[in-house]
Amino acid sequence: MNQHSKQPARRGNAVWAVVITSIAGFITALDNLIVTTALPSIRKDLGGGLEDLEWTVSAYTLTFAVLLMFGASLGDRFGRRRLFAIGLAIFTAASAAAALAPGMGELIAARAAQGVGAAIVTPLTLTLLAAAVPAERRGAAFGIWGAASGIAVATGPLIGGTLTEHLSWQWIFWVNVPIGLALIPLALLRLDESHGPNPSLDLAGTVLASGGLFGIVYALVRGNADGWTSTLVLGGFIAGTALLVGFVLFELRAEHPMLPMRLFRHRSFSAINAASLLMFLGMFGAIFLLSQYLQTVGGYSPMEAGVRMLPWTAMPMIAGPLAGALSDRIGGAPVVTVGMALNAIGLGLWALAVEPQVSYTSLLPALIVCGIGMGMFFAPSANLVMSTVRPQEQGIASGANNAIREVGGAVGVASLAAVFSAQGGYGSASLFVDGLRPALWVGAGAVALAAALALLMPRQHKADESASDLGGEIPAAV
């Protein structure tokens, strides 16, 4: 009788976990791009120069990227549910501070604080979800989570443009506040608490990894503005690389490493993380440039441009859950490989279709193909990461994968923008297309390489084989 009474409660907790983590993942992912279409209004109200506007975007991305692994470690140490609620509280309070900011300095500081909250929340969404959902249903659950995060990334400019156009730019931040206030008590009441295996925090590893990622991401963000051979940019690359090398060397010798290097000996773990970096490189760079193409060349307003990206936006909502369920049947690796191949094809179709006066319908095939591919990537790739490690190491694995994705996005925006500016510019529609076309081909090549790396993963990823490789039990694989 007792066993039967626990079964509905278990299913109920799993449903709540899917809802809570998917919404939390949505709002933190949304803030990566939601501010982009509001920048002209922000500058009009608060003043400031171009560098201030750039930091309004990058302050969130930088803190998000460099603190992700530390956020996962904090959850393992002090309790994942507790830190998840604290991260939501930081993100919510920072969102309100951004909306109330009287000047650019205060807004940038609030955006950095948002990144701190998001860095705690994001990796814990996966570990909390994996703990609450039975292994045989985890693929479908990750499908819903992945669809929510994918839609947030794709709709950031649309939502930002719509709120700015019809209300005010402050509402791109106010919208987070009621959602965060609702999620905090739900998380404390409906999610189970869990901890990682190590009671100590790897502070030295955290400083080395965060400093290294900060140096590289900062150099990539500032490369176009300051010059790729400037002292600050070269110093960022050199210092960042040195710190990351130091991080690897330190982790190899640490008694309780934040990121055990032995995880990368597993072929699937290494391959899916490398593929994720390249996938986000191509995807984020393309989003950054294509949104501008629709507005600069197509002449659409921010909201109109976002609406015309809906065929791409809607596809992950359909393909994500289906891909997650399919990965439960045939394994995640084939689904991820096909998804990234479709993204590469879609970017190639964009490169072939873009012209100064091309019709919107000529872009539709590329939008749809990329949308399906993106939906097929998010859920199975997340489940592959979680399936290749032991349950007590899911927090660090999730943090590492999310940090790698964020770094990939920063690399993508910087590298594709560099190709664009070298070959074209904003002077005319023809000049814009001259720069956009080769940039899209570079993005397509990066995602095609990601698909090739995915081929290195086993087609059927069995739990008993992975447990043998890693020396312990792992959740059932996708």
Image: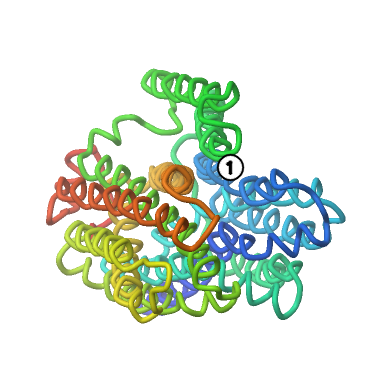
The kind of secondary structure element at disc 1 is helix
Q: Residues within 10 Å of mark 1 (few under 14, many from 20)?
A: many
Q: Is residue 200 visible?
A: no
In the displayed structure image, the side of residue 456 where residue 49 appears, left or right: right
Q: Is residue 367 above or below residue 219?
A: below
Which residue sits at x=50%, y=40%? 69
Q: Is residue 242 above or below residue 86?
A: above
The scheme the figure's colours follow is rainbow
Q: Position of residue 161 (x, y in %)?
A: 63, 72
Q: Which residue type carries mark 1? A: Leu
Q: Is residue 420 above or below residue 218?
A: below
Which residue sits at x=39%, y=52%? 280
Question: Is 139 in front, or is 151?
Answer: 151
In the displayed structure image, the side of residue 108 where residue 154 appears, left or right: left
Q: Read off the residue under disc 1.
A: 62
Q: Quadrant of the C terminus?
A: bottom left
Residue 350 quadrant: bottom left
In the displayed structure image, the side of residue 209 where residue 440 appears, left or right: left
Residue 177 quadrant: bottom right
Farthest residue in the left direction?
A: 459
Q: Quadrant of the N terminus?
A: bottom left
Question: Is 248 in front, or is 226?
Answer: 226
Q: Position of residue 418 (x, y in %)?
A: 46, 42
Residue 138 quadrant: bottom left
Farthest residue in the right direction?
A: 102
Q: Is residue 121 visible?
A: yes
Q: Position of residue 266 (x, y in %)?
A: 22, 38
Question: Is 21 in front, or is 114?
Answer: 114
Q: How many marks?
A: 1
Which residue sits at x=55%, y=40%? 221
Which residue sits at x=69%, y=68%? 172
Q: Position of residue 360 (x, y in %)?
A: 40, 79
